[in-house]
Image: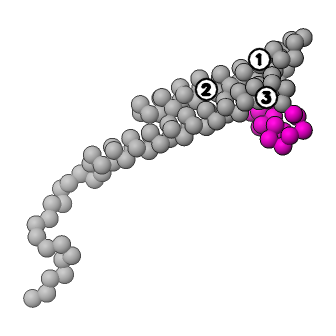
Amino acid sequence: MSNIDPMPGPHSYDQPTGGPRRHERNQTAARRTALTVHTIADIAAGFLGLWILLYLLEANSANVFVEFVHGTADWLAWWSQDIFTMDTEGLRVLLNYGLPAVLYLLIGHGIAARVSRA
């Protein structure tokens, strides 16, 4: 007699597909997505905050690192450039780059919290 059944013994074919493992996988995916959104928001706000700090400390604008941070901050804050036009240059930079930093943090962390609860 030949047995072609790969798993001998009784079979239970009425098990639901997915089951509790599917829910665990969805939760894990949601947590990873939330962590990714959270991290991206933190990095964006970090670049903006770093540029504000470098500007206020009068860092060498010819330095490659300072140029990179400034370019990244300009790219992240393109939409908020010159919202505030102050006579004091330091205050203008603080407000024009600080506003997007705060918004990125609030929106990014809010989205991450919402996704992780789903």
Q: Residue at x 54, y 28 (%)?
A: 109
Asked if the stretch drawn in magenta spans residue 72, the answer is yes
Say if 19 sits above or below 52 in the image.
below
| Quadrant that contains the C terminus | top left
Q: Which residues are magenta?
A: 60-77
Name the residue type under label 1.
Leu
Residue at numbered disc 2: 105
Dot in front, 2 or 3: 3
- Residue 102 in percent (x, y) is at 65, 22
Say if 55 sits above or below 3 in the image.
above
Could you say which is closer to the camera, residue 3 or residue 107?
Answer: 107
Name the residue type under label 3.
Leu
Residue at numbered disc 3: 54
Dominant SS type (magenta): helix
As measured in the structure, the alpha-carbon distance from the residue carrying label 2 to the one carrying label 1 is 15 Å
Could you say which is closer to the camera, residue 115 or residue 68?
Answer: 68
Q: Residue at x 13, y 73 (%)?
A: 8
First of labels 2, 3 by sequence position: 3
* Residue neighbourhood size for the residue with mark 3, other residues' Cα within 10 Å, grouped as few (<14), some (14–19), many (≥20): some
The image's mark for residue 95 is 1
Q: Residue furthest bottom?
A: 1
Q: Residue at x 71, y 24 (%)?
A: 100
